[in-house]
Image: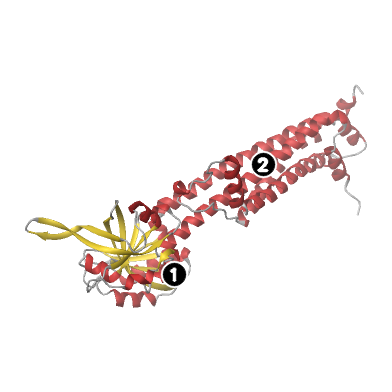
Amino acid sequence: MPMPYELFIGLRYLKAKRKQFFISIITIISIAGVFLGVMALIIVLAVMNGFETDIKEKILGTYSHIILLKQGQGGISDYPAVIEQVKGYERVVSASPFIYNQVMLTSKSNVSGVVIRGIDPDTAGEVSNIARSIMEGSLSDLKQHGGSGAIAGIVVGRELARHLGAFLHDPITVISPMGHVTPMGMVPRMKQFKVVGIFNIGMYEYDSSLAYISLEEAQRFFDMGDAVTGIGIKVDDVYKAKEVAGIIQGNLGFPYWTKDWMEMNKNLFSALRLEKVIMFIILFLIVFVAAFNIVSTLIMVVMEKNKDIAILKSIGASARSIMKIFIIEGLIIGMVGTILGALSGMLAAVNMETIAGYVERVLGFEVFPRDVYYLDRFPSELNPLDVVIIVVVAMVLCFLATLYPSWKASRLDPVEALRYE
């Protein structure tokens, strides 16, 4: 099948002759602009996706998808029956009780205020990933009771252990401001625990401010009897958590109420989503500027090819065909830049950890400070839909950039162009 002459001429105009070398340089710059814009968009959105996913995994690995609470003081006293009822709901995978409170930990060398959670070591791993985050010791060692002279166990985060200067099997004193009333006034509750585990979630905020003890020890220490603060619930689809939470709250009724993981971290994820949108808009402008380069390139080509256009029109080429020639030329520039940018962006996105490590070694400083971003690795997650959207948007912009120069070329009057030839 013969090649359409519009395509043949459009490809031919991309090849510069010696006197048109400057136009060829501008063409290369236009391709490079689209290439860099598309590549930057793909890489940045992949990093943003990875950052959001990593944060989400760490939050869901620390806390359950839904928490069930009870208004008023005293907590949930009949929690075994409530757990059995909750497990009967569709999409609910497991449930585990917990006690939540704020305390102060003291060691031989330091003091730190933390959130302490009383958990059931047998079921806590079913609603969170805390058991898999243990780097030293074991979560099951929390089962040892503090009675008969034995010291109860406590599991602390890696950063918290560093701050306290505590190691495995070291003693730590837990102090609660909610103490006992005596004739001398309020006396804080104090109890010594032994470090039986150190966990590393990979998020600095959690590793430096969380500690776990057994549910029974928490009930005794906070004088809660057989009650718990709430129940952690895991569902089979994290994005259905809000729907399941509404069903559970509606069926249990007052005084029970629920909160899902998105509601508990609304500010964080809203900020991440907003930042992602803003970064997309900013980098989209790079592609937009590159599209303007295509406009300038085609205008210069049209000015250079005035005589060629006039001859083509004189031998019967229609305005539509002339317009096609320059649209094809502009689309080829955009397509080459977009394809190269997409391939380079995807290759870089899937190897960001390696690239970041290489850059850090070459430049001699940390590009991605772990303590600032609360993460222990460089996150990157390539979303195929993002790539498709970026490619389509880039090609649409490049197509729109070709319309005005192509229209001007199609409106050229051959008589005026050839008058002085």
* Quarter of the figure with residue 329: top right
Q: Is residue 135 left or right of residue 347?
A: left
Kind of residue at disc 1: Val
Q: Which residue is mark 2?
A: 36
Q: Is residue 246 visible?
A: yes
142 or 264: which is nearer to us?
A: 142
SS assignment at label 2: helix
228 or 393: which is nearer to us?
A: 228
- Residue 301 position within the rendered picture, expressed as x and y whole percent measured from the top left: 80, 32
Kind of residue at disc 2: Leu
Q: Which residue is mark 1?
A: 235
Task: Please report the residue visible at 67 percent of the width from the left and 45 percent of the height from the top.
Answer: 394
Instruction: Identify whether 101 is placed above or below 216.
Output: above
Q: Earlier in the sequence, mark 2 or mark 1?
A: 2
195 or 336: which is nearer to us?
A: 195
Q: Is residue 234 left or right of residue 219?
A: right
Task: Please report the residue visible at 61 percent of the width from the left and 39 percent of the height from the top.
Answer: 285
* Quarter of the figure with residue 137: bottom left
Cα–Cα span, label 2 and label 1: 42 Å
Q: Is residue 230 visible?
A: no
How crowded pointer 2 is (Cα within 10 Å; few <14, some 14-19, many 20+) is rated as many
Q: How many marks?
A: 2
How crowded pointer 1 is (Cα within 10 Å; few <14, some 14-19, many 20+) is rated as many
Q: Which mark is residue 179?
A: none
Q: Is residue 247 left or right of residue 331?
A: left
Q: Is residue 381 left or right of residue 136?
A: right
Task: Please report the residue visible at 71 percent of the width from the left and 35 percent of the height from the top.
Answer: 293
